[in-house]
């Protein structure tokens, strides 16, 4: 690093922008990731491999907001205040940035691999992907990343270190592209077959759920590469800069690129809240906001439709009213019996009906003891 009064003067506006942006996004990254982490840890139903990996990614983003970005603010504030350049502070912020970047991209590779295993080995998924193995993989990722970063402060040349880091990122990117191609090929191949079988029997794999979760994680991967693209470009530019590697232009490129990369820690939670219903419910529970589901009694639900509670809660969130299929004529109750029991059941349950929009059917849900039984061939 080169430091002199003229250089600090030319970097004055850049340092101001870095301080302001990191101050804002350090706060958003910290406050947005805390509820995600707490909700996953405090909700037993979310203690499964995919959510544990998501919690690891959110923890990395949280550490970015509460450690790395404050270090950036402190370092640039020292430069603006005219105090001596701190090599230790600069080395700490640069090393931690690379550490969390390695951990994040490795976690994204593990998440994509877990999604592929869930589809490719769906019958043996629970035996292959377990919580202890997931925790061991996360621990191994942190150990490998720390060992890789330690090589730089211990004396590894900056040019060699940057080349190795760029190679690791390129390999991880290729793995992510290959894994998601495999995932969506599997989804496309089985989609028609599963949708056909679902009309008669509940599918062994919830293809819609896997498609949505895979798409959500793909969005997270795309966000990562969008925000880290300037950093990758800065690394490539540094390797080819030659004698101008310590120029003011290269320093400005580094500062802008790294500031944009750190914003990714604030963007990921927004994706979780937008795309993941389970995370939204858990976070609402953290803040004491309960989801009230209104269940009405009346017409039947198609047998074998899965968990009624989850299915009707999701439909309530999407539509504001229930829209369910009537059971087939064979194996179902007669319309007379159903209509006869409506008033009695309403009186017992004390449930009020709701007014639906014009042109829509008013459909109701049986209590569990009045569910239609399974249909058997005659």
Image: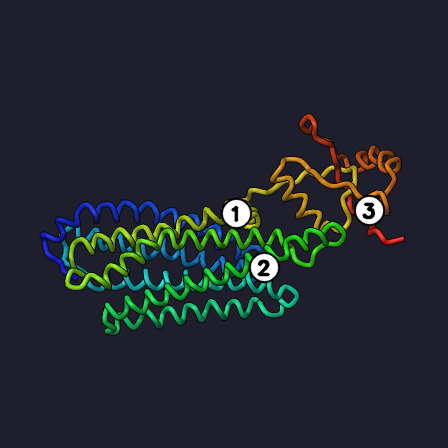
Q: Earlier in the sequence, mark 2 or mark 3?
A: 2
Between the C-alphas of marks 1 and 3, the distance is 33 Å
Q: Name the front one of labels 1 and 2.
A: 2
Which one is in front, 338 or 350?
A: 338
Q: Name the front one of labels 2 and 3.
A: 2
| Label at residue 275 | 1
The local secondary structure at tag 1 comes to helix
As displayed, is residue 293 above or below residue 58? above
The local secondary structure at tag 2 comes to helix
| Label at residue 300 | none
Judge left or right: residue 256 versus residue 280: left
Between the C-alphas of marks 2 and 3, the distance is 34 Å
Q: Residue at left 79%, top 38%?
A: 299
Q: Earlier in the sequence, mark 1 or mark 2?
A: 2
In the rendered image, residue 48, in percent from the top left (x then y), is placed at 57, 61
Please give the residue where the numbered disc 3 appears in the rendered image: 372
> Mark 3 and mark 2 in contact (Cβ < 8 Å)?
no
Q: Earlier in the sequence, mark 1 or mark 3?
A: 1
Determine which quarter of the picture holds residue 128.
bottom right
> Mark 3 and mark 1 in contact (Cβ < 8 Å)?
no
Between the C-alphas of marks 1 and 2, the distance is 21 Å
Q: What crowding class fits label 3: few (fewer than 14 Cα within 10 Å), some (14-19), or many (20 or more)? A: some
Judge left or right: residue 338 versus residue 276: right
| Label at residue 186 | 2
Determine which quarter of the picture holds residue 64.
bottom left
Which one is in front, 57 or 244?
A: 244
Q: Residue at left 31%, top 71%?
A: 150
In the rendered image, residue 204, in percent from the top left (x then y), is placed at 69, 59
């Amino acid at each position: 690093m080169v430091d002199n009064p003229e250089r600090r003067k030319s970097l004055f506006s850049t340092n101001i922008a870095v301080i302001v942006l990191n101050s804002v996004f350090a706060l958003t990254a910290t406050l947005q990731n805390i509820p995600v982490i707490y909700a996953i840890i405090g909700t037993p139903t979310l203690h499964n491999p995919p959510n544990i990996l998501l919690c690891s990614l959110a923890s990395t983003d949280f550490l970015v907001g509460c450690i790395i970005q404050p270090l950036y603010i402190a370092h640039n504030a020292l430069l603006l205040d005219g105090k001596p350049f701190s090599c230790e502070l600069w080395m700490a912020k640069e090393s931690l940035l690379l550490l969390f970047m390695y951990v994040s991209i490795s976690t994204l590779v593990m998440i994509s691999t877990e999604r592929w295993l869930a589809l490719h080995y769906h019958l043996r998924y629970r035996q292959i992907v377990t919580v202890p193995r997931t925790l061991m993989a996360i621990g191994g990722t942190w150990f490998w990343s720390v060992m890789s970063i330690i090589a730089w402060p211990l004396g590894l040349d900056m040019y060699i270190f940057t080349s190795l880091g760029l190679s690791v990122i390129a390999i991880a990117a290729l793995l992510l592209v290959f894994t998601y191609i495999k995932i969506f090929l599997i989804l496309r191949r089985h989609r028609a077959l599963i949708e056909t079988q679902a009309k008669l029997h509940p599918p062994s794999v919830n293809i819609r759920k896997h498609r949505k979760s895979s798409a959500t994680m793909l969005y997270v991967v795309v966000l990562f590469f969008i925000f880290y693209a300037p950093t990758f470009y800065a690394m490539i530019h540094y390797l080819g800069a030659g004698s101008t590697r310590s120029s003011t232009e290269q320093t400005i490129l580094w500062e802008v690129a790294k500031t944009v990369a750190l914003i990714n820690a604030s963007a990921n939670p927004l994706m979780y809240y937008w795309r993941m219903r389970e995370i939204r419910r858990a976070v609402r529970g953290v803040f004491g906001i309960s989801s009230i589901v209104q269940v009405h009694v009346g017409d039947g639900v198609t047998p074998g439709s899965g968990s009624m509670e989850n299915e009707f809660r999701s439909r309530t969130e999407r539509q504001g009213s229930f829209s369910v299929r009537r059971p087939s004529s064979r194996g179902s109750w007669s319309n007379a019996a159903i209509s006869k029991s409506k008033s009695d059941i309403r009186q017992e349950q004390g449930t009020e009906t709701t007014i639906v929009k014009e042109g829509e059917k008013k459909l109701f849900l049986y209590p569990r003891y009045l569910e239609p039984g399974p249909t058997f061939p005659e």
